[in-house]
Amino acid sequence: MPTSEFPREPNLEHLRNQAKVLRRRVLVGDSAARELVREFHPRLAGADVQALAAVTLADAQLVIARQYGFGSWPKLRRHVEVVTRYARSPHRAPTGGPVTTEGARAGEFLRLACLTYGGDNAARRERARELLAAHPDIATASIHTMAAVGDVTAAAALLADDPAQASAPGGPHDWEPLLYLAYSRLDSTAAGHSTLEVARLLLASGADPNAGYLWEGTYPFTALTGVLGEGEDAVNQPRHQFWLPLARMLLDAGGRIPTTARVCTTACSPPATTTCGCCSPTDWAAAPAAPGTPGSAPRCRPRPRCCRTSCCGRPSTISSPG
């Protein structure tokens, strides 16, 4: 029973309409639609014309769900809800536009300073450094720029006044501050700048060590993914300036890595530092302590190419907490 490829950017209303159209086609006697029902509906495998004439919308929804590899319509719906909530495409965010206001400069800086796993290169990071040098106020424009720069004094003052800022999404990618920090490659060594210390402040103020997003609605990218960097392009996607102590800090705070204590970072495009990318976005979001802690995961996808190569066999240099 081969399944169809699920849309990368699924729309629940569109899927509902697919089910409605399928039901209408079945009821008017469309042979292809009826064969689809017989193939994917577990109770209608050998259904005759009379049984198919009684197909309900719920039946059609089940067929659509199973056609895409889900066990039920509620599981498909939950998957779409999770993807809709966490999907981000930072690599699509354009750079080089007008930056005449403080907010525009801050947004441009974050787009340039952080890895996006699509078009990353040293020139982008250098442009971010030049922009910050020309406009030092960018460093304190928001908790997100404070995190990317590592401005310890500004972050400490803001979080002392409003700890909720530690988990506030924002900036051009609608990320939490810890993600901008983890994916930043500004690598500032200026006095008073330390992304490691700002990470400590964020976590102490309630930031989620498993903060993350779904790259194009598919691959789970967490703070740990950003810290470890690399993927298929280690030159343009280097590890974080403080990758080892920062990774350990995230783990100590409850960050997750596979139970085998191995991290897949080298052969995937994009990389996955959850369960080597083997699980669906819903599995990632449903895991304990994940953002929003949604309900039970519907399924686990087949392992991608990266998990059939050497990357999953390379022991990580960081240890599981405890």
Image (tube, grey):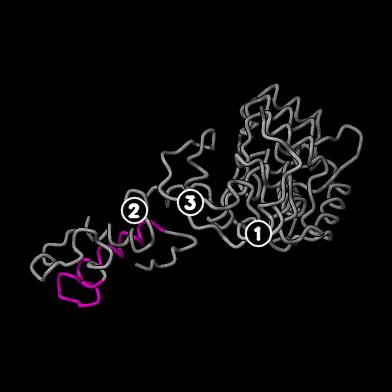
Q: Which residue is mark 1?
A: 268
Horizontally, is 196 left or right of 133 in the view? left
> Which residue type does callout 2 highlight?
Gly
- Would you place residue 37 above or below residue 143 in this image? below
Residue at 31% x, 59% y: name it.
16
- Would you place residue 304 above or below residue 320 in this image? below
Q: Which residue is mark 3?
A: 83
Percent of width and height locating residue 100: 76, 53
Percent of width and height locating residue 310: 69, 58
Q: Which residue is mark 2?
A: 71
Residue at 40% x, 67% y: name it.
4
Q: Quadrant of residue 194?
A: top right
Crowd around label 3: few <14 · some 14–19 · many ≥20 (10 Å): many
Region rendered in magenta? 11-35
Proximity of marks 1 and 3: CB atoms separated by less than 8 Å: no
Q: Nearer the viewer, mark 1 or mark 3?
A: 1
Horizontally, is 270 left or right of 284 in the view? right
